[in-house]
Image (cartoon, rainbow, N blue to C red):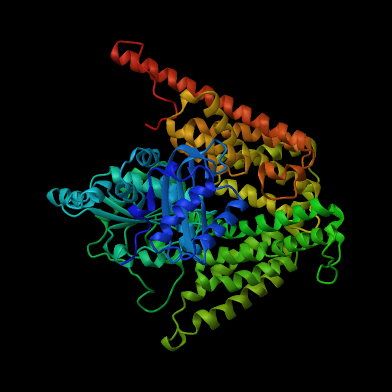
Amino acid sequence: MNTPLITADLVDLDLDRTATTKDEAARSLAGRMAAAGRVTDLDGFLADVAAREEQMPTGLEGGIGIPHCRSAHVTEPTLAFGRSTTGIDFGAADGPATLVFLIAAPAGADQDHLGILSTLARDLMRAEFTDALRAETSPERAAALIRGEDPAQAADPAAPAADEGDADADAAGDGAPFRIVAVTSCPTGIAHTYMAAESLDRAAAEADGVLISVETQGSAGFERLDPAVIAAADAVVFAHDVEVRERHRFAGLPTVDVGVKAAINRPAELIAEARRRAADAPAGTQPRTGTDGDGDDTAPMDRAAGDSADGFGTRLRTWLMTGVSYMVPFVAAGGLMIALGFALGGYEISDAPSVADHFVWTEAHSWAALLFQLGGAAFGFLIPVLAGYIAYGMADRPGLVPGFVGGAIAVTIDAGFLGGLAAGLLAGAVVMAIQRVDVPAALRGIMPVVVIPLISSAVVGFLMYIVIGKPIASAQSGLTDWLEGLSGSNAVLLGILLGLMMCFDLGGPVNKVAYAFATGGIAVTAPSDTSLQIMATVMAAGMVPPLAMALATTVRGKLFTRTEKENGKAAWVLGASFITEGAIPFAAADPLRVIPSAMAGGAVTGALTMAFGNTLRAPHGGFFVVPLIGSPLLYLIAIAAGTLVSTALVVLLKTGRARKTAVAAGSGSGSATAAPEPAGAAR
């Protein structure tokens, strides 16, 4: 039996008795872990906690502190909780933390560490969770609440559990509950993934007789749903913008297949649709948890073709987004290292000799050259990774080899990102075609490791080198020349278009297309000024929506719900860091007012940055890379202008809605004094 993550002896509801600083709080909570036998060396563990704290403060908005680390002195994943009435400073912008969670994971246990953090982060998004912890008087009930159990059951073991009561209600009604399994995933694997899961969980809880189990395939990896849970399910919901990993586990189940934002915006509809599809499914439909019956492990997208109502366009978007999602970390790491190299050594650092031949430890120029060349090495993988994982999205692992080979050829013949896209799609199509060939049973064992990589790489290589590579390279060259020739009103129009794209779906596919277009322009040894301007425009426009929502909740808080006002505090940091997804909670609650307002501000910012000629060599970083921006003061003015436009529009639109609601309420009750509903409230 697994030891619970947190027990009553790891809870301190009066942390003020022993701690007034973050170091004292960590020692007090870690002492409880040591007493429970989960930490073997208290001082060694605290040193690891302090080292992690030095890297970046662990305070969160809303009075929360989450000190955490991986340590060789931890025996098993553990969480301790402390509550302070006076507050303890963990470096959050809005003040001290009253809720402190100390998270400990064994050394090397990245999945445990990230899994605990992601689960806790989802819970902390819910005001009812944090409010309940602040009001709780029993350590047993607090521990149960954090574990996700019924606190009443912890206080009185004889009391029936909530789930048991629900089950009884179901048995007394229509029979067994309707069981749904779901998978959520998005390109970055952080914001959309977990918000969609939370949204589905809430909708299932509000539905009658529905139980749901969600697998989040996020940046922390994913913990597979128990095969028994899948086998018992009545339907599956896929909410994803990248390919669902190991999709064959759900084959045979009635399927609802949508983008990740659909689960955020309309989860109840998806659950209702899952019920309808299950009702229409043939009797005896069962999921398969391995390969196909004939041993042929076919492509994940091909397996789902019969279960999904999505057309080719939706599937194509998913394939492309899979490639982009795997490419983005290379872009961020490589681009930031190149930018730091320029910051330390100037733009002439690009001409420095290889650090493998010349490196002086005491010279800043050598360190600058090292950073620049490391970034260049990371950038060298962009197109092969893009092509490889597009093919992976289409044909699973057999697509990786021809995809990477085709992407490398695209680099060799200067076909650029257009060549990478073509190579990935071509590789996936070739592998899918080979997989459909009926081969003798004796050859099936060597198909995935020998035959498919050999044949598909040869076909893709031939086509890229001899047939389509050169025309694509010419098209890429023509596009580059056209961009370099943009000036004046044409450049401003491009800036408006990019601004609209960045703000249209707030981190979704359209946003990622604009971002990939920009990063592709700077992923070369000597990017043109126009490419640098496009990168600056894309980042500036992407910062506007969360900043505008944060400002709107500050200046006109009465137009927003309590939850939105809390999200507005986090949106300041997210916007400043170029995380457009910070505006998603606002758009999900009121899309018809928030999204047009965001797009208007993004268009203004995009036009101004192109008009000002701002340039940027880093593909990410927000305000933290302002020193690397050409004409930084004008750049900040462009962002401020777009933010003010979006803020003014969303306030104006929400004010109009609030007035209409008040008038309608007055008319219905015969009085004009009814209090208006907050404009951000979902109906």
235 horizontally vs 215: left or right: left
Identify whether 234 is placed above or below 560: below
Q: Residue at x 65, y 72 (%)?
A: 405
**Quarter occupied by the C terminus:** top left
User: From the viewer's perspective, is residue 388 above or below residue 675?
Assistant: below
Residue at point 72%, 43% (across, down): 536
Q: Quadrant of residue 388?
A: bottom right
User: Measuring 74% from the left and 53% from the top, which residue is drawn there?
Assistant: 522
309 left or right of 187? left
Whether residue 593 is visible, yes or no, is yes
On the question of residue 259 being in view, the answer is no
Is 494 placed above or below 436 here? Answer: above
Tally of numbered discs: 0
Q: What x and y, as percent, mark residue 253?
A: 32, 61
The x and y percentages for residue 432 are 50, 71
179 or 362, which lies in front?
362
Quadrant for the N terminus, please: bottom left
- Quarter-wise, where is residue 356 in the image? bottom right
In percent of the image, x 44 and y 52: which residue is there? 29
Residue 166 lies, in percent from the top left, at 20, 49
- The residue at the far left in this view is 172
Q: Residue furthest toward the front? A: 17
Between 185 and 112, the one lying in front of the other is 112
Estimate the x, y position of residue 543 in percent, counting from the top left. Answer: 62, 39
Residue farthest along the top direction in this orientation = 671
